[in-house]
Amino acid sequence: MKPDPSKSCKQPAISQPAQKGFSLVELIIAISILVTLTGSIAPMITRYIEGARAAVCYSNRDAMRSEILYAYAAGEYASLEEACKEIPAKPTYAGKVCPAGGKITCTVKTDGSYASLTIACDHAGHEPLSRSVEP
Ligand SMILES: [Zn+2]
């Protein structure tokens, strides 16, 4: 008797379970893409952070300059030089002006009828803040 092909005892193929996780090649490709992206983005992020620090430093020095000029105009200090020396040493400002850790210096240069108030930070890239004042 010939076997009936439609009634074969061949079992249906057992389906493979779905592949879980990633293969080694896929992981290597994904990691290399991440390393490339990180390498190209990191300098840009560093520049943004440094720019933000410079802006905060400038803004804090501008607030300090306003306070110096206001205190001098209000007569709280005998001279602009004294205000320039005392106010940056206040606990409000001491060590808190530059988020990058730059050292703040306040100088007054008198030239005839005008004085130039300059508040500088020694951190690289932090521009000095200068203003002419009538003493
Ligand atoms: Zn600074």
Image (cartoon, grey):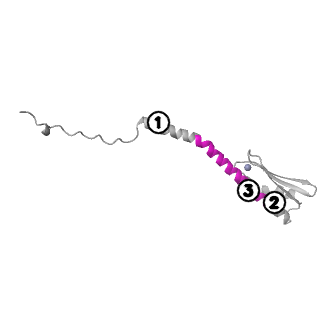
Residue at the bottom extreme of this rendering: 74
CA–CA distance in space, label 2 to label 1: 59 Å
Compared to 69, does 38 lie above or below? above
- Foreground mark, 3 or 1, reads 1
- Residue behind mark 2: 68
Mark 2 beta carbon near ligand 1 (under 8 Å): no
| Magenta span main SS | helix
User: Which quarter of the picture shows residue 27?
Assistant: top left
Q: Amino acid at mark 2?
A: Ile
On whether residue 71 falls in the magenta region, the answer is no
Q: Residues within 10 Å of mark 1 (few under 14, many from 20)?
A: few
- Foreground mark, 2 or 1, reads 1
Question: What's the residue at 14%, 39% (across, down)?
Answer: 6
N-terminal of the pair, mark 3 or mark 1, is 1
Q: Amino acid at mark 1?
A: Ile
- Residue behind mark 1: 28
Q: Amino acid at mark 3?
A: Asn
Residue at the top extreme of this rendering: 1
Question: What's the residue at 73%, 56% (across, down)?
Answer: 60
Measuring from the top left, give residue 87's x and y in whole percent.
Answer: 80, 58
Measuring from the top left, give residue 67's x and y in whole percent.
Answer: 79, 61
N-terminal of the pair, mark 2 or mark 3, is 3
Q: Secondary structure at mark 3?
A: helix
N-terminal of the pair, mark 2 or mark 1, is 1
Which residues are drawn in magenta?
40-66
- Residue behind mark 3: 60
CA–CA distance in space, label 3 to label 1: 47 Å
In depth, the one of 115 and 106 nearer the eye is: 115
